[in-house]
Amino acid sequence: MYANQQKTQTTPDVCRSVNGHHSGVGGVPLGIFTKSHVTVTNKGVQRVHEFLLQDQSARLLPKERVCNCLKKRIDKTKLRDIKYNEERKKAHYSNVQRCGSVWTCPVCAKQITEKRREELKTAIETWKNVHFGGVLMLTLTFSHSATESLRSLLERQKKALKIFNETTKVQALLKKIGVQHKIKSLEMTYGQNGWHPHNHILLLTKNQVEDYQSYISDLAVLWIKACTKAGLNAPSMTHGLDIRDGNYASQYVAKWGLDFELAKGHVKKGRNGGYTPFDLLQFSMLDGTMNNRTAASLWQEFGIATKGARQLVWSRGLKKLLNIEEKTDEEQAEETEHNAITLRTIDDYLFSLLCHYQQRHQFLRCLERDYENGCFGSGEAERLLISLCELELKRTDFEE
Ligand SMILES: [Zn+2]
């Protein structure tokens, strides 16, 4: 298992090897994506730019919407623009589709989870300070093995949760605790015992609850029963169900979804020693294997099995109660263009070169630097485009 992690590869941020030649014009490193974009250490797989990960996900899931994300145009009669947000000092592409796939698109996942984390934080604060309620965190897990498919586990997990929620005794116990609303998060990791889907559920209680621990064992028995009824392997009494206090819930909310934020540092190992799905995606760039399966096939399985699965589910009416606007994933992903100015347009041919040579992110970085250095229109971005054209000429000459 994790055989490839023994070796350590370190490379510059942008790979310089193109068809075996090192190239670079005006100090701009050039290249196509290679395995050396990924750094593997004993701690795990380290950061890869989310655009490169998005390319990798698209390569492995060629029928999914992630393939068009930030590539295909929205309005076919117009060119793609590059806009710049002066507040965030970040450039981005405009008039391009966004897939809004929270599970399979690293770019959209990052944007969506950042916004959802803020919503969660606001919700918890409002619940505590305006409604004077308490918050607990319920965690539900079950046993699984490496031979079980993710799709089947997810189906049975959903069934078990439904049985649990509809059990009269469960409802009575939650009522005693004072639970009025719930926010359910679905998370997945992968480890030695295969896929590990689990739920963390924020319980919003009427008052602060001190004696919640006395309910754990009764609820755990009911959860085990629900798992067995749904065809899952029963969890143990000590591991299947857990409830933590408000401090823990707040810490959880503060870090919620951070596994998706790949650009902010290396990806930590998932909880319970497992790997996060985006770890698997990064690992697939190195042809990694786990449990005698390739990371690439695990990612493909993950991409198909999570289609339509909801990452975060709020009790009906809760968002309205806490003044949080209802937005779809797609709407969340599209909200990047506020306060942005247009830097330039880019034609189809040049954009196709940026995609082909996997330089979409590099082009944005060059434009950001050019804009800040006041050499817009004659700086790094132009040199990058020129060198990509030269490379392409060489490549087509070679093919002829
Ligand atoms: Zn996307």
Image: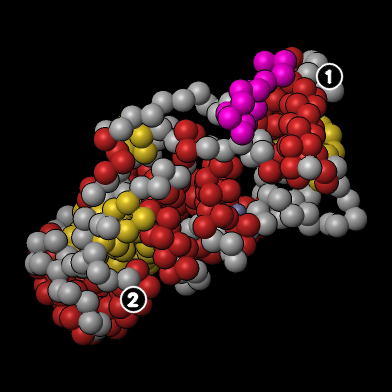
* Number of numbered tags placed on the structure image: 2
Q: Determine the residue positioned at 79% across, 42% down.
A: 400
* Amino acid type, callout 1: Ser
User: Is residue 19 on the magenta stretch?
Assistant: yes
Residue marked by disc 2: 152
Between 207 and 331, the residue placed more toward the observer is 331
> Is the residue 165 above or below the residue 146 in the image?
below
> Is the residue 269 above or below the residue 116 in the image?
above
Q: Quadrant of residue 75?
A: bottom right
> Is the residue 221 above or below the residue 26 in the image?
below
Ligand 1 within 8 A of label 2's CB? no
Q: Is residue 145 visible?
A: yes
Q: Determine the residue positioned at 79% across, 15% down.
A: 374
Label 2: state its secondary structure: helix
Q: Quadrant of residue 3?
A: top left
Ligand 1 within 8 A of label 1's CB? no
Q: Is residue 112 visible?
A: no
Q: Determine the residue positioned at 23% across, 49% down.
A: 1
User: Is residue 128 on the magenta stretch?
Assistant: no
Q: Is residue 256 left or right of residue 169?
A: right
* Amino acid type, callout 2: Ser
Q: Is residue 237 left or right of residue 104?
A: left
User: Which residues make up the magenta segment?
Assistant: 17-31
